[in-house]
């Protein structure tokens, strides 16, 4: 059988081949843009990073830690300089780091995306590709009650800290 441009069956064959070629990326693409058709395959989760989210209280966040907030696609860290927050959407193809099977990990020592192995430092700085960009650093504030709020719509400079007032 040959691939004839005028044969309507060959167009269908090309589409199938394209879909097969894209299959290894399906997890990342589906994670970024879920559709009604793949409800069975894509873990449900919140919509992409938008708005403010409460990530706990200052008195519950241990010093010298960085932890993922389940379901929120952000991580919150605390060190001697204060608090910082990161988006956990990988800069490569948008996998959510730290969620789902083979999701990689988030710790004070660094961050690893489980999809293709990109690695970031605790500030979201890129250490190893295939990603070519750091993780977004997000604005953080502490309410009078001690509640920590991360604004997923506001980027801050890499390595920024929100000082803790004692
Ligand atoms: S999506 Fe490819 S390394 Fe994270």
Image (tube, grey):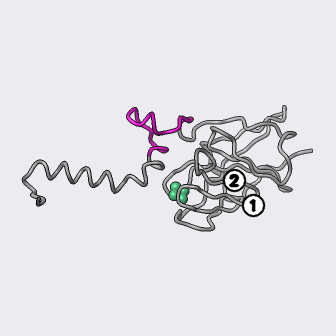
From the top left corner, tell me how far across and down residue 17 is, in percent. Answer: 27, 54
Q: Position of residue 78 (x, y in %)?
A: 80, 51
Looking at the rendered structure, the secondary structure element under dot 1 is loop
Question: Quadrant of the image for the C terminus?
Answer: top right
Nearest the eye: 136 or 94: 94
Name the outermost residue toward the bottom.
128
Which of 39 and 66 lies nearest the eye of the viewer? 39
> Of the numbered discs in the image, which one, if any, rests on residue 25?
none
Which quadrant would residue 1 be assigned to in this image?
Answer: bottom left
* Residue that badge 1 annotates: 109
Residue 117 image-quadrant placement: bottom right
**Can I make out residue 64 in this image?**
yes
Please tell me which residue is depicted at 53% across the width and 55% down the height of the picture.
115
CA separation, marks 1 and 2? 8 Å
Which picture quadrant has residue 49?
top right
Q: Within 8 Å: ligand 1 and the Cβ of disc 1?
A: no
Q: Which residues are magenta?
A: 30-47
Q: Residue at x 13, y 48 (%)?
A: 9
Indicate which disc residue 106 carries. 2
Q: Residue furthest right?
A: 166
Q: How many marks overall?
A: 2
For label 1, count other residues whose C-alpha is less than 10 Å away and answer few (under 14), some (14-19) or many (20+).
Answer: few
Majority secondary structure of magenta residues: loop
Image location of residue 124, percent across then percent down: 66, 58
Q: Residue at x 60, y 60 (%)?
A: 134
Q: Is residue 112 left or right of residue 161?
A: left
Q: How would you rate the neighbour count of disc 2 (Cα within 10 Å): few for under 14, some for 14-19, many for 20 or more? A: many
> Residue at coordinates 63% horizontally, 39% vertically from top-left?
72
């Amino acid at each position: 059988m040959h691939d004839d441009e005028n044969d309507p069956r060959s167009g269908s064959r090309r589409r199938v081949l394209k879909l097969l070629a894209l299959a290894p990326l399906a997890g990342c693409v589906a994670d970024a843009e879920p559709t009604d058709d793949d409800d069975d395959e894509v873990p449900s989760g919140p919509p992409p990073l938008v708005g403010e989210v409460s990530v706990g209280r200052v008195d519950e966040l241990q010093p010298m830690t960085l932890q993922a907030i389940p379901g929120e696609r952000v991580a919150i860290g605390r060190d001697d300089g204060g608090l910082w927050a990161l988006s956990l959407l990988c800069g490569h193809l948008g996998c959510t780091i730290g969620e789902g099977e083979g999701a990689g990990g988030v710790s004070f020592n660094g961050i690893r995306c489980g999809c293709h192995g990109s690695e970031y430092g605790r500030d979201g700085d890129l250490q190893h590709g295939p990603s070519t960009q750091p993780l977004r650093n997000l604005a953080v504030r502490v309410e009078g009650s001690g509640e920590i709020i991360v604004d997923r719509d506001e980027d801050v400079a890499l390595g920024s800290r929100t000082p803790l007032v004692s």
